[in-house]
Image: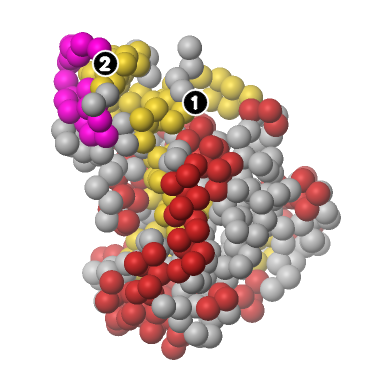
């Protein structure tokens, strides 16, 4: 059985609130010891002095475009980008071509991820067949094939009766429903956030209300059914207020936001750079601050990337026609360091919990911790490393990031999954 000794890193574990310089000994796929001055003969050594060592990042929300659009991303290229960004587990959304609405496609994704053998890839299957919002998929068969939750992400389930039944059905299996909370009628044709900037730019806006009315409906249905609801990419102050109240009322709700919602606001669209066009849109500065406060007070449980690769030709279309989305695996850490840690005073324990332990609990996974006997999923970070996001530095097949050619700070330098090094440390 192979052994790895990670030496001298600043080990951060949110579960135990550990934040201390020490060593980690890995034996096989598990953590054998955590402590100071550990010794191990014939163990591979990883020097982590001056680095942070934390549980591997878990992304509850990404798009891998496989099956259907291998020109944008594949499971292999997406997994490569994920481990380069520090992620050991990723959950891929079902708006593929065809959608992830049957056990054959779920099985394909799981087998392809096993072949690639980089990070864990968990399919989130469609709530409804063809993601049309009309007929619920076979949850039991999809879970048996490997699905870890259900979503029609990219679209909301408009029919409240269907959504209620989906929640009730999911409760049978105690798996979460991942909702994309945007009223499709209110946002049809929208390009950006509705507000002063959209008026100034002459672009159709997506109102904050479109998110809030669906969040309000879903919270009522979640309370009624007692099912687990996970609200994706929350971006507005009003939605956060509703979620905060629901949590106080005992509703089984969790939610995520994405780095771009606390890093940018809608004023960036003044450049007409389509890489800022995301869904839901970048909101007002007041909403951005509300998202930061939601992260601070625990209303927002975790940070997900909503990694959304698109080919250059599509993103070069005019802003009203270009697709929504930006890539996120490889920039998430730098955005978190720059805005949350350096600007907003978050602790490393705080942000790492939202990237590891919190999403692990939502998935009911035993990962996200550093303790004896735990699965050795680990991410090693150089928090002060400056690097440039050039096209050659990007592992994703797509390069649609507004941070392209910008200098960033903070970089994952090594990733271990099941005790195996999947992304090599800088030497």
Is 416 on the left-hand or right-hand side of 118?
Answer: left
Q: Residue furthest bottom?
A: 161
Indicate whether 147 appears above or below 13: below
Q: Is residue 239 above or below residue 224?
A: above
Residue 410, disc: 1
Left or right: residue 243 compared with residue 64: left
Q: Residue at x 76, y 57 (%)?
A: 322
The answer to which of marks 2 and 1 sits earlier in the sequence is 2
Q: What number of labels is visible?
A: 2
Disc sitting over residue 99 in the figure: none
Foreground residue among 110 and 125? 110
Q: Position of residue 291 (x, y in %)?
A: 46, 52
Position of 131 with respect to 251 (left or right) is right
Q: Residue at x 47, y 44 (%)?
A: 115
Q: Is residue 193 above or below residue 33?
A: below
Q: Is residue 291 visible?
A: no
* Secondary element at tag 1: strand
Please state which of residues 186 and 388 is positioned toward the viewer in this rendering.
Answer: 388
Left or right: 347, with 117 as reference point: left
Residue 43 circle label:
2
Q: Secondary structure at mark 2?
A: loop
For the residue carrying disc 1, how many other residues have a C-alpha within 10 Å: few (<14), some (14-19), or many (20+)? many
User: x and y percent of residue 389 in the render?
Assistant: 64, 29
Which of the image's four quarters has the N terminus?
A: top left
- Residue lying at 26% horizontally and 16% vertically, measured from the top left: 43
Proximity of marks 2 and 1: CB atoms separated by less than 8 Å: no
Decide: few, some or many residues near mark 2? Use Cα within 10 Å; few <14, some 14-19, many ≥20: some
The magenta span reads: 24-43
Asked if the stretch drawn in magenta spans residue 32, the answer is yes
The structure residue drawn at horizontal position 61% and vertical position 45%, both measured from the top left corner, is 327
Residue 5 locus on image (x, y percent): 27, 18
Instruction: Let me know if residue 384 is in the magenta part.
Output: no
């Amino acid at each position: 059985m192979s052994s790895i000794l990670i030496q001298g890193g600043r080990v951060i574990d949110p579960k135990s609130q550990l934040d201390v310089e020490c060593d980690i000994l890995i034996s096989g796929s598990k953590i054998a010891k955590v402590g100071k001055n550990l010794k191990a003969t014939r163990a591979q050594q990883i020097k982590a002095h001056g680095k942070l060592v934390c549980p591997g990042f878990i992304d509850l929300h990404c798009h891998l475009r496989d099956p259907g659009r291998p020109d944008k991303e594949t499971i292999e290229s997406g997994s490569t980008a994920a481990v380069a960004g520090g992620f050991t587990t990723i959950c891929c959304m079902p708006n593929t071509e065809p959608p992830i609405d049957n056990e054959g496609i779920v099985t394909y994704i799981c087998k392809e991820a096993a072949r690639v053998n980089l990070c864990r890839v968990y399919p989130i299957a469609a709530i409804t067949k063809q993601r049309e919002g009309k007929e619920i998929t076979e949850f039991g068969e999809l879970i048996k094939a490997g699905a870890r939750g259900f979503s029609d992400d990219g679209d909301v389930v408009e029919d409240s009766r269907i959504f209620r039944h989906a929640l009730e059905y999911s409760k049978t299996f105690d798996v979460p429903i991942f909702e994309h909370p945007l009223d499709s009628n209110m946002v049809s044709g929208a390009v950006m956030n509705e507000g002063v900037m959209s008026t100034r730019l002459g672009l159709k806006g997506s109102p904050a209300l479109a998110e809030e009315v669906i969040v309000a409906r879903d919270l009522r249905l979640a309370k009624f059914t007692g099912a687990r609801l996970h609200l994706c990419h929350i971006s507005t102050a009003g939605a956060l207020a509703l979620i905060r109240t629901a949590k106080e009322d005992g509703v089984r709700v969790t939610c995520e936001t994405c780095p771009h919602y606390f890093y940018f606001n809608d004023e960036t669209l003044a450049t007409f750079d389509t890489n800022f066009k995301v869904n839901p849109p970048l909101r007002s500065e007041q909403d951005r601050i509300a998202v930061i406060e939601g992260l601070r007070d625990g209303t927002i449980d975790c940070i997900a990337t909503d990694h959304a690769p698109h080919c250059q030709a599509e993103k070069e279309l005019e802003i009203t026609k270009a697709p929504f989305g930006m890539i996120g695996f490889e920039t998430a850490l730098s955005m978190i360091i720059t805005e949350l840690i350096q600007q907003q005073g978050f602790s490393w324990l705080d942000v790492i919990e939202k990237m590891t332990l919190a999403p692990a609990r939502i998935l009911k996974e035993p990962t996200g911790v550093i303790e004896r006997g735990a699965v050795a999923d680990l991410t090693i970070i150089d928090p002060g490393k400056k690097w440039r996001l050039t096209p050659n530095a990007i592992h994703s097949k797509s390069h649609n990031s507004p941070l392209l050619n910008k200098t960033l700070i903070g970089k994952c330098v090594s990733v271990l999954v099941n005790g195996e090094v999947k992304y090599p440390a800088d030497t």
